[in-house]
Amino acid sequence: MVPRNLTMGILTMAFCLAACGERSDTVAEESSQTEAVAESAAALALTPSPEGARVFFISPANGDAASNPIHIEFGIEGMAVVKAGDNQTDSGHHHLLIDTDLPDLGLPVPADANHVHFGDGSTSTQITLEPGEHTLRLLLADHRHIPHDPPVFSDPITITVE
């Protein structure tokens, strides 16, 4: 027969080892989750933009009346326009925002009717809009379609389509 205090000691040690093993698994799992979050954050790390960089509309001008198809020309200063996927310093590609606010500036720009991508490196386009008043804005994004830090976007302009 094993003395009671020795049995308690063995049980305590077994419990401690089991708990330590569970804790070790939990710590390993938490560490793995932390690494995954860090990798995700690094993947979405914002690309820096140079001081003074800006995008703007060459045409149309704010307040212009236009008819379809509407010719739009994009301007840029302090950065280069490159194709999406081209990871060059101080560069990006245009996104035309139509009748919408700025998207989440820490995530890729959505691709829909209100967020038109120019990943081909275009600096002009022709669009067709319904008659009426419309607000347009340019937003530059990096090779992954994520806005820069600080973000480079134009003041909004309003045009009236006749």
Image (tube, rainbow, N blue to C red):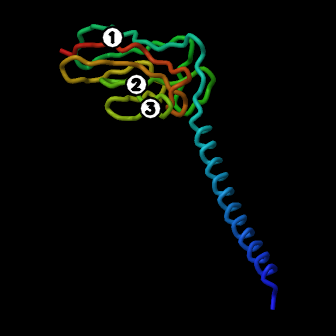
Q: Which mark is residue 60?
A: 1
Which element is circle 1 on?
loop
- The residue located at (50%, 18%) in the rendering is 152
Relative vertical location of residue 161 with respect to residue 83 in this rendering, above or below = above
Provide the residue designation for mark 3. Answer: 109
Question: Relative to the observer, which residue lies in front, 48 or 89?
Answer: 48
Q: Which mark is residue 2?
A: none
Give the residue type that dot 3 points to. Answer: Val
Q: Which residue is labeled 2 in the image?
A: 102
Image point (28%, 17%), residue name: 70
Give the number of the mark in front: 1 or 2: 2
Question: Spatial distance from mark 1 to mark 2, Cα to Cα?
Answer: 20 Å
Residue type at tag 2: Leu
Please tell me which of labels 1 and 3 falls first in the chain.
Answer: 1
For badge 1, the amino acid type reads Pro
Quadrant that contains the C terminus: top left
Mark 2 or 3, closer to the camera: 2
Q: Residue 24, located in which quarter of the rendered image? A: bottom right
Instruction: Give the Cα separation between the discs numbered 2 and 3.
Output: 9 Å
Reading the chain from its start, which is encountered first: label 1 or label 2? Answer: 1
Per the image, label 2 sits on a secondary structure element best described as loop
Assess disc 1: are there few (<14), some (14-19) or many (≥20) residues with their C-alpha within 10 Å of its C-alpha: some
Q: How many marks?
A: 3
* Residue furthest front in the image: 4
User: Which residue is at the far bottom?
Assistant: 1
